[in-house]
Image (cartoon, rainbow, N blue to C red):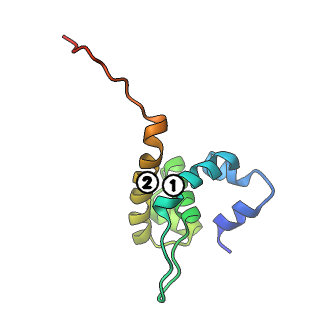
Amino acid sequence: MTLMRKLRTSATNDLNNYLRMDDMCFNELLSMVKPFISKKNTKMRKSITAEERLIVTLRYLATGRSLEGLKFSAVISPQALGRIIPDTCQCIYKALKKKYLKFEMRTQLMV
């Protein structure tokens, strides 16, 4: 069992400390981005779950650790992390932009 799965199943506040986000917020964000970041299993390998993708991305954003540093807790290669993190960040933006990133439309030009 990976560290991330242990954190999700622990009864303590470990996930909150690890991601800087409480479980309710994490689950809400996961439900919004899951359709964009879920991948299918193949005959050759099992895919990295949407939950694992989001956790490793949030950990990266919360700490700024290198991909080499994240590979130990995530048990994902740095090469895969290099693809997962930017992709997940784009999907987070796509899922949240209409609700949280609204820009005021001005009818007058500023002189």
User: Residue 90 at x, y = what percent?
Assistant: 39, 52
User: Residue 89 at x, y = what percent?
Assistant: 43, 52
Side of 109 where 17 appears, left or right = right
Residue at the front extreme, as displayed: 107
Name which residue lies at 33% across and 23% down: 105
Name which residue lies at 53% across and 81% down: 46
Name which residue lies at 49% across and 37% down: 99
Q: Amino acid at mark 2?
A: Cys
| Helix, strand or loop at mark 1 | helix
Q: Residues within 10 Å of mark 2 (few under 14, many from 20)?
A: some
76 relative to 57, above or below: below
Where, quadrant-wise, is the C terminus in this rendering? Answer: top left
Q: Which mark is residue 91?
A: 2
User: Residue 36 at x, y = what percent?
Assistant: 46, 59
Q: Between 108 and 11, which is closer to the camera in this rendering? A: 108
Res. 87 image quadrant? bottom left
Side of 27 where 90 appears, left or right = left
- Looking at the image, is mark 1 or mark 2 earlier in the sequence? 1
Residue at the right extreme, as displayed: 11
- Residue at which label 1 appears: 33
Query: CB atoms at circles 1 and 2 under 8 Å apart?
Result: yes
Residue at the left extreme, as displayed: 111
50 relative to 104, above or below: below
